[in-house]
Amino acid sequence: MNWPRTSQLDVVSLNAFYGQAHILFDVDFTVHTGEVVALLGRNGAGKSTTFLSIMAMVARRTGTVWFDADEITHLPTYEIARRGLGFVPENRRIFSDLTVEENLLVGRQAPREGAPTWEPEKLFSLFPNLAEMRKRPGGRMSGGEQQMLTIARTLMGNPSLVLLDEPSEGLAPKIVEQMAAAILAMKQEGLSILLSEQNLHFARLISDRAVILEKGRVQFTGTLAELDARPDVRDAYLAV
Amino acid sequence: MQLVFVQFMTGLASAASLFLVASGLSIIFGVTRIVNFAHGAFYMLGAYVAYTLTERLTGVFGFWFALLAAAAFVALLGCLLEMVLLRRIYHAPELFQLLATFGVTLMVEDLVLIIWGPEDLVGPRAPGLAGAVVMFGKRIPSYDLFLIVLGPLVLAGLWVLFHRTRWGVLVRAATLDRGMVAALGINQKWLFTGVFALGVFLAALGGALQIPRDAVNHAMDLRIIVEAFVVVVIGGLGSTTGAFVAAIIVSELNAFGILVFPKISLVLVFVVMAIVLVVRPWGLFGKMPPPAQAAIGTTVRPWRPLNRTELIIAGIVVAFVALQPLWLSDYALTVGSEILIFTLFAASLHLLMTVGGLASFGHAAYFGLGCYGAAFGVHAAGLPMVLAIFAGPVLAAFGAAIVGWFAVSLSGVYFAMLTLAFSQIVWSIAFQWVSVTGGDNGILGIWPAPFASHPSGFFWLTLAFVVPALAFLHMVIFSPFGYALRATRDSELRAEAIGIDRKRVQWIAFVVAGAAAGLGGGLFAFLKGSVFPDVMGIPTSVDGLVMVLLGGIETVLGPIAGAVVFKALSIWLISQTDYSKLILGAAIVVIVLAFPKGIVGALSDWRARFAEWRSDPRPSPGAAAMMAAAGAGGISGRFADPDDVAKKSVSGRAKP
């Protein structure tokens, strides 16, 4: 870790393409160490594509991505994950035939200096629901339980920064609260978090700063207080 | 009763090797999504290498060490193959993967011939297990008992590996979602290589374990791969338990088939497979497979029928071909007739696999049925030649109607394996039903009518049948039926949602393609004057696939060009070398890797660039780059990610 540098993830003029369709246009933003940044925007604004581009899971993209001291733009996906960048995808992607414990086993990586360390027991106390179903196959869990498992699975890799794609999507209100509490607990452990959200209320509960995407371009960057001072931005890019 | 018991034990013992091979096939497919046709070749190599090692290493320790060392050595070869070949084609359409691994099989067959010679080799008995144990008054070989115990032990070992080790859990995770496994920091490259090595090890061990029981020979690869396909179709692709149960079922059916129905023993297994498929389409222990990768890449340039100029050119080409008897030798004309027949065969397969997206690995069955139809027409019904030729497509269409009914409920690799298995049924009927088909001796004396008895006459006759048939197939492609067929290829669900009865459309295509192949077969019978079961063997089916591939899988006219080039080259090659399989196999691999768009695909690329250049002599660098990108959007060069290709097809028609 090079501590004088406070930015942990730097995305610099990121462009992404699906075939010849241009999806992201010169996206720039930064996540500082220990910070929770919310990537906000409507459906189709490019949030998931941004995450996939950071993880090198999009076929064609330009621009640069810096993580810690290194440029990771051209690394393969698994190597990016091994540098300590954890990714929790949008549609959960639980291994449905594997039990909860086996799902966690797949995510396991060696402890990392400067990042919080996670063990199954510690994760079971973070997500108590999972503790009651250690031997249950992932395919026979509710949506909320799967969402918890997918986060826990990524934490098993002891990442220093986590990309959370829409952690509150499709969850019951009670589960959303639990999820917010868990994310705050993760933050307290010292984890940096970049999460995408459509739900401003949820983002407000946990985030320090917000980046707003619309049609693949960054439209606003600032603290949540700054965003609150700009109802025009909120209405233009977030109101449904 | 005692005999029943003996047969039962023999069946169980045979099941062990079959289970090892099939489970290896299944494990490899589960993770890499590749159906490894070369698995039979690895089984055979395992047996040959074990034979050589047991020659040198004797004694109890030496023998068992030799078997394991042989399997390990072949697994190492498997690693090499995975790293050199398969890593380049993981994103390719299934058809290319099957063909590339089949190319490897062909190469191995000739290499085995070069290294070990053509004779059957008899390995040593297993030290310590050479005797027999008396059970129920019958002597059961100890080695068979050992194999009977070994099968469940391997199954248990695999279970422990996949459930109790992290590597095994990773493999299972990769079977479910490869992308997610990578996102969790696992280098899939080595996971894939490891899985492939494990699968090949199991196959080679299966082969090595056979040497105390059976002679080692160079035909054992295709026999075992067909049986292994049947096992995974019955048991369910991806399930080791399924492979175990199905291997026992298949082996017992083989053992008792010979006892109870000696005349149809080969058919019995396939009948059971057909029943299983009707009841449980994904096998006894299988799950519904994920959506198949389209057999065909994207068509960057949309298809269109020939325009007026091109029709005139086609007419001139046909007229030119028709004039050949004026100057070609009799031998060249006979070759020419054969080439014409195979253009029809290739075009009929093209209708099924390119237009319909159904890659059949058993299309030779309908060609062969056509041959037999003509032969029956002459000998049983006493028909004149022209009517007998028409008996070919009738019999072929009848066979295709039955097989197609089963086959269209599956797609992708299941379809390929099922059609392959059915073609083996047809082959085994021709082979075993001696009273009707003459079995291995074939049916002789199918002579053409006097007007076609001279090579030039027969050449014209062939042309008179083939050209209208090709024109008909071309019309089918651009008929409303052809569009419906392409719709089912591009999206099953959307096609059904707009009211297309997918199964019916695909079934009709199967029958039409079968009948067209059968017409070729009818002509072929009269060309050769005889019919043998080999005409419907796997090599003929694969020849057809290679012709379509060589011509260009995304094109309309590809099969004609492919058939002409392939047939001419292979006839020439066989006259030049004893190792034509080695060269053909290498050629298949090279085509898949380097020229996946084929001859016509490459030509039309070139033509499109030329047109681009003419309309704007100095293309901007951007346009050139776009053209290159559009080319890459297909299946040229390195294979693009399938998802990516799918998305590209949407935008591929945007003006550059």
Image (cartoon, rainbow, N blue to C red):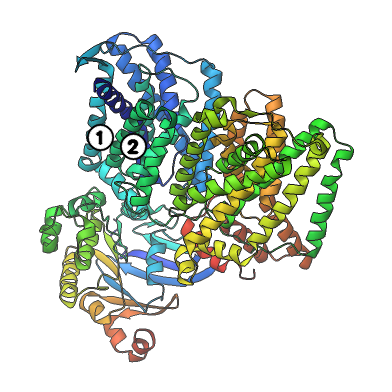
The residue sitting at 37% across, 51% down in the picture is B278
The image quadrant where one finds the N terminus of chain B is top left
- The local crowd at label 1, few if under 14, some if 14 to 19, many if 20 or more residues have their Cα within 10 Å, is some
- Kindly report the distance in space between the C-alpha atoms of the residues bearing marks 1 and 2: 9 Å
Q: Tell me the residue that label 2 is attached to.
A: B23
> Which chain does the residue under circle 2 lie in?
B
- The amino acid sitting under disc 1 is Leu
- Where disc 1 sits, the SS reads helix
Q: Residue at x 22, y 30 (%)?
A: B153
- The residue carrying mark 1 is B155
Above or below A77: residue B218? above
Q: List x then y, in percent, for residue B632.
A: 58, 56
Q: Find out whether the residues at labels 1 and 2 contact each other: C-beta distance under 8 Å.
A: yes
- In the foreground, B234 or B36: B234
**Which part of the image, by quadrant, shows the C terminus of chain B?**
bottom right
Tags 1 and 2 both on a single chain: yes
* Circle 2 SS class: helix
Q: Chain of mark 1?
A: B
